[in-house]
Amino acid sequence: EIYHLEANGSQRFVTEITAPSPQSYGQFGKSTARYENILAVGSHEANVGTAERAGKVYLYSFESNGTVTFLSEVVAPNLSIYGYFGLTVSLFENYLDVGQQGPYVFDKGSVYIFRLTDDGSTTFLKKISTPEDFTGNSSHPSGGTFGTAFTQSTEFLAVHCDNSNVYIFDKTSDSLNLLGKLESPEENFLEILSENQSPTSISANSELSFPEHQPVGTIISSFTATDPDVTSSITFHLA
């Protein structure tokens, strides 16, 4: 289902999209991405011919009036059973990136890079796998680790890997060469960031004293505080 987010935060239903050939366990919509008027929808457990759960990505044209038109479907160039192609997707400019986390129990995962045209046709450019050897993650649907999340810009592709690294690739050429990697400063860095931390440096901007019988709505003072949780809001209460 597609909703339009209004300026006041409310949501308005626009339309519902289904796979051209629905499958009972295809996981259609598990991953989605949109860039301008192109919408990509992953169905990573969809069968492709006789290849069970090989996975697909469906491409649609999405117009401002809510009209959705199916364009094409994308599958892995080297099709394999239990490939889980389409578990993650990303669209940016004329690039479609698709994550695959199979087909083996301890497969390390990969990202397929496609060039995309306005009519929904794609050209396969390259398959990227982890530049380093490490043990796969058996808790993942198929043990995959590389490509469980990624993001891209005009010049760079950043791919997350469960070995606590993010690998940066150069998109200025079709070779997509590895530029380097970002390593977590601490083993539990993500867990530390997710903890709610108390605000610091709470202070009033004026003296907290005032005469009696002030009218309702009189501003007494204002407060400032610094919160290490950058995405959090701060609420003040009188004790």
Image (spheres, rainbow, N blue to C red):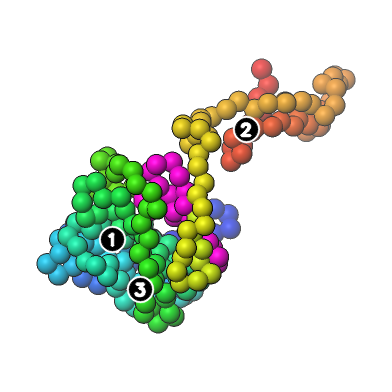
Rendered image quadrant of residue 8: bottom right
Q: Which mark is residue 85?
A: 1
* Residue 22 in view of the camera: no
Mark earlier in primary sequence (3, 1):
1
- The residue nearer to you, when weighing 145 against 170, is 170
Depth check, front residue: 210 or 228: 228
Q: Quadrant of residue 72?
A: bottom left
Coordinates of residue 81 in the picture (x, y in percent): 17, 60
Residue 193 coordinates in the image, percent (x, y)? 53, 34
Residue 200 visible in the current orientation: yes
For the residue pair 148 and 7, the one nearer the viewer reads as 148
Residue sitting at x 68%, y 21%: 238
Distance between mark 3 and mark 1 Cα atoms:
14 Å
Residue 95: horizontal and vertical position, in percent?
45, 70
> Vertically, is 45 above or below 203?
below
Residue position for label 3: 124
Q: Which residue is mark 2?
A: 228
Amino acid type for the residue under numbered disc 1: Phe
Q: Is there CB contact under 8 Å for labels 3 and 1?
A: no
Name which of mark 3 and mark 2 comes first in the sequence.
3
Q: Residue at x 24, y 67 (%)?
A: 78
Against 173, residue 205 (above or below) is above
- Residue found at x 40% / y 82%: 119
Q: CA distance from mark 2 to mark 1?
A: 38 Å
Q: Secondary structure at mark 3?
A: strand
Secondary structure of the residue carrying numbered label 1? loop
**Type of residue at label 2?**
Pro
- The magenta segment is 146-167
